[in-house]
Amino acid sequence: MPTPLVPVLPETGEESKALFYVTGAVFIVAALWLLRRDSVSRGGK
């Protein structure tokens, strides 16, 4: 069995983890903003 030319394989999935973290943070901020907007509009009427 021949040895591979690349001594160390690159790590995979690092960018996708960051993408999931950013996407999750955006969803959390959007949900908090919508809940706050809804509660403020109900209190104002």
Image: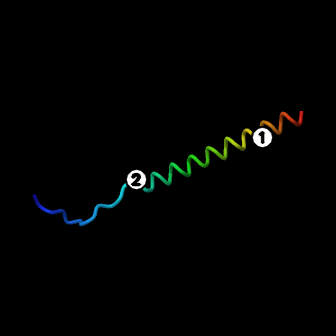
Residue 38 x %, y %: 78, 36
Look at 24% across and 65% down and name the residue there: 6
Question: Badge 2 is on which residue?
Answer: 13
Look at 63% across and 44% down and name the residue there: 28
Count all numbered tags in the image, as a single digit.
Answer: 2
Residue 1 x %, y %: 10, 58
**Left or right, residue 38 beside residue 1:** right
Look at 86% across and 35% down and name the residue there: 43
What residue occupies the far left of the structure in this picture?
1
Task: Estimate the spatial distance between the alpha carbons at disc 1 and disc 2, rounded to whole Å.
Answer: 36 Å
**Nearest to N terminus: mark 1 or mark 2:** 2
Residue 30 x %, y %: 67, 44
33 lies above or below 18: above
Amino acid type at mark 1? Arg
Asked whether disc 1 touches disc 2, contact meaning CB atoms under 8 Å apart, the reply is no
**Left or right, residue 29 beside residue 16:** right
Q: Secondary structure at mark 2?
A: loop
Asked whether 45 or 7 is in front, the reply is: 7
What residue occupies the far right of the structure in this picture?
45
Look at 53% across and 51% down and name the residue there: 21
**Left or right, residue 8 beside residue 38:** left
Q: Quadrant of the C terminus?
A: top right
**Left or right, residue 19 beside residue 30:** left
Question: Badge 1 is on which residue?
Answer: 37
